[in-house]
Image: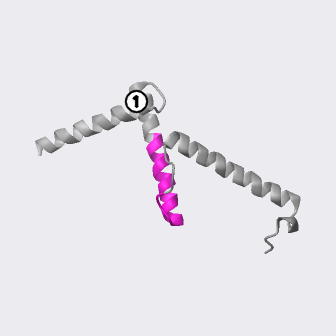
Amino acid sequence: MPTNPLDRAAEDLALVYKLRWESENFFGWWKQHLKVYHRIARSKYGFTMQILAGLITYLLLAIYGRNHLQEKVSIRGVRELRIKIHNEAWGLAILS
């Protein structure tokens, strides 16, 4: 397979740049909304799990924010949820 871009059709090059741009947009969204600035995992499987975990976390925060705070995901909502979970876990530890 040639590695020289001049050996490729213009349509192929346009598709490659389009796909790269979509990838850049996704990771821009990822950094902005999920506050993840670097990869933790090194393998393809681990990276997939990191993305899925981040998306699941974001969706759970969005549901919590909508149902309990009547707002979108915010740092205030995340802090409130963290405190609530901490207090409930502390209460369970005392009861045990």
Provide residue 7's location: percent of width, then percent of height. 87, 68
| Left or right: 19, with 63 as reference point | right
**4 displayed left or right of 27:** right
Q: Nearer the viewer, residue 6 or 45?
A: 6
In reply to whether residue 82 is colored magenta, the answer given is no
Q: Position of residue 15 (x, y in %)?
A: 78, 56
Q: Residue at x 46, y 35 (%)?
A: 62
User: Whole-percent x and y of residue 20?
Assistant: 70, 54
Above-or-below relation of 81 to 93: above
* Circle 1 SS class: helix
* Amino acid at pointer 1: Arg
**Residue labelled with disc 1:** 76
State which quadrant residue 8 falls in: bottom right
Q: Is residue 47 magenta?
A: yes
Magenta-highlighted stretch: main secondary structure? helix
Disc count in the image?
1
- Region rendered in magenta: 40-59
Q: Residue at x 78, y 75 (%)?
A: 1
Q: Is 33 situated left or right of 87 in this image?
A: right
How crowded pointer 1 is (Cα within 10 Å; few <14, some 14-19, many 20+) is rated as few
Residue beneath the point at 76% across and 58% down: 16
Give the residue displayed 78% in from the left and 71% down from the top: 3
